[in-house]
Amino acid sequence: MTEALRQAELAAARGEVPVGAVLVQNGAILAADGNRTLELNDPTAHAEIQVIRAACAKLGTQRLPECDLYVTLEPCPMCAGAISFARIRRLYFGASDEKGGAVEHGTRFFCQPTCHHAPEVYSGISERPAAQLLKEFFQERRD
């Protein structure tokens, strides 16, 4: 999660919402990135999508069943869907997102009967620093 937090900080430095993600296989980082929606003019360029795309390209596959995803914020419905379709083994996330999250909030994507694959989910990992990054980012924009 330390690298995911670093990626979130880099995203904030680019003016992006500070969310970072890391995909790991057998203890090795396959991909690490942060949000790039503004930079790429792409509403799908969330940190989770970025690392899933990079890892799939690196491994030459569309499925990542031996991979674990670390992300600083609870994934949204789009990202939860991508996590499911990629068959990611475990999801670790930091801050909860009561408004936009889809794992423990909102649609609770992985609990739906239409969900093809649900990863093991572990929440609250480095929650305080992840939440603080977001809080500071949005506070600066309001001031």
Image (cartoon, rainbow, N blue to C red):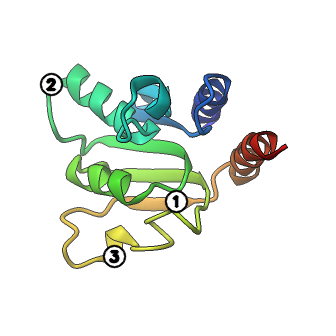
Decide if residue 77 is on the left or right side of residue 56. Answer: right
Q: Amino acid at mark 3?
A: Cys
- Residue that appears at 21% across and 52% down: 85
* Of the image marks 1 and 2, the number of the one nearer the N terminus: 2
* Of the image marks 2 and 3, the number of the one nearer the N terminus: 2
Q: Secondary structure at mark 1?
A: strand
Q: CA distance from mark 1 to mark 3?
A: 14 Å
Residue 2 in the image: state x and y as whole percent. 64, 33
Q: CA distance from mark 2 to mark 3?
A: 29 Å
To which quarter of the image does residue 119 belong? Answer: bottom left
> Which residue is denoted by mark 1 in the rendering?
122
Q: Amino acid at mark 1?
A: Tyr
Give neighbour class at mark 1: few <14, some 14-19, many 20+ (Cα, 10 Å): few
Decide if residue 2 is on the left or right side of residue 89. Answer: right
Q: Which quarter of the rendering shows the N terminus?
A: top right
Residue 50 in the image: state x and y as whole percent. 37, 32
- Residue that appears at 39% across and 61% down: 120
Q: Secondary structure at mark 3?
A: helix
Give neighbour class at mark 2: few <14, some 14-19, many 20+ (Cα, 10 Å): few
Residue 11 in the image: state x and y as whole percent. 59, 28
> Which residue is denoted by mark 2 in the rendering?
60
> Which residue is denoted by mark 3 in the rendering?
111
The answer to whether one can see residue 6 in this image is: yes
* Of the image marks 1 and 3, the number of the one nearer the N terminus: 3
Q: Amino acid at mark 2?
A: Gly
Residue 63 in the image: state x and y as whole percent. 18, 41
Q: Nearer the viewer, mark 1 or mark 3?
A: 3
Along the line of sight, which residue is nearer the eye, 3 or 12? 12
